[in-house]
Amino acid sequence: MILRLAAALLLLAVLAFGAWVRLAPLPADLYHRMDSAHGVGDWPVASGFEAVRQVTEPKATLAALVAVVEATPRTALIEGSVEEGLVTVVTRSALWGLPDISNLWIEGDRVHVRGHLVFGPFDFGCNRSRIEGWLARAGVH
């Protein structure tokens, strides 16, 4: 009896966690921003990754990146546009639907691509891998 109750409570906790992760709001006012002091290069952090590239045509480069990003499975636009020069998307993990936020923006002749997790302290390199893949597919070096 106690074992069944414990199993039921565990199952309920897992289902509640799954629902919370998938249904938690992702307000644009918290995530739709460009705030980086990084220069050209790759900038890993525990909760994500940022790549900054100097390019000759920033708007065209951003448009190419956004096209690649929009074709990424489980990725949806939160806010922004190429015309605005700032695009914010959410990409969810396959199993739990954990959200990672990515910002792509233009700053002068640089394009920034930053991805970070929403829940937890470490992303285990997922954002770096995703961003490097986006850059490669868009032909941005």
Image (cartoon, helix red, strand yellow):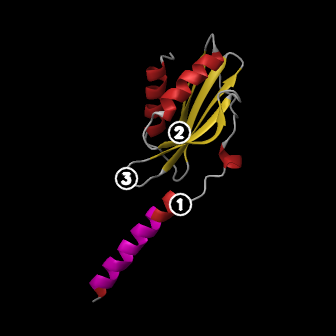
Q: In front here: 135 or 40?
A: 135
Which residue is label 3 attached to? 95
Q: Few, some or many C-alpha atoms within 10 Å of disc 1 (few <14, some 14-19, many ≥20)?
A: few
Residue ID for mark 1: 23
Give x and y (percent) for residue 15. 41, 68
Image coords of residue 115 (percent x, y): 55, 37
Q: CA distance from mark 3 to mark 1?
A: 14 Å
Task: Judge depth for marks 1 and 2 and give the one in front.
Answer: 1
Distance Cα–Cα, label 2 vs label 3: 19 Å
**Is 104 placed above or below 41 here?**
below
Q: Residue 134: tell me if it is visible.
A: yes
Amino acid type for the residue under numbered disc 1: Leu
User: Are the residues tagged 3 and 1 within 8 Å (C-beta)?
Assistant: no
Does dot 1 land on a helix, a strand or a loop? Answer: helix
- Amino acid on which the number 2 mark rests in the picture: Gly
Comes first in the chain, label 1 or label 2 = 1
Identity of the residue drawn at 63% across and 34% down: 87
Disc on the earlier residue, 3 or 1 = 1
The part of the chain drawn in magenta is 3-18
Element type at marker 3? Answer: loop
Name the foreground residue: 69 vs 108.
69
Q: Is residue 7 magenta?
A: yes
Q: Residue at x 45, y 44 (%)?
A: 74
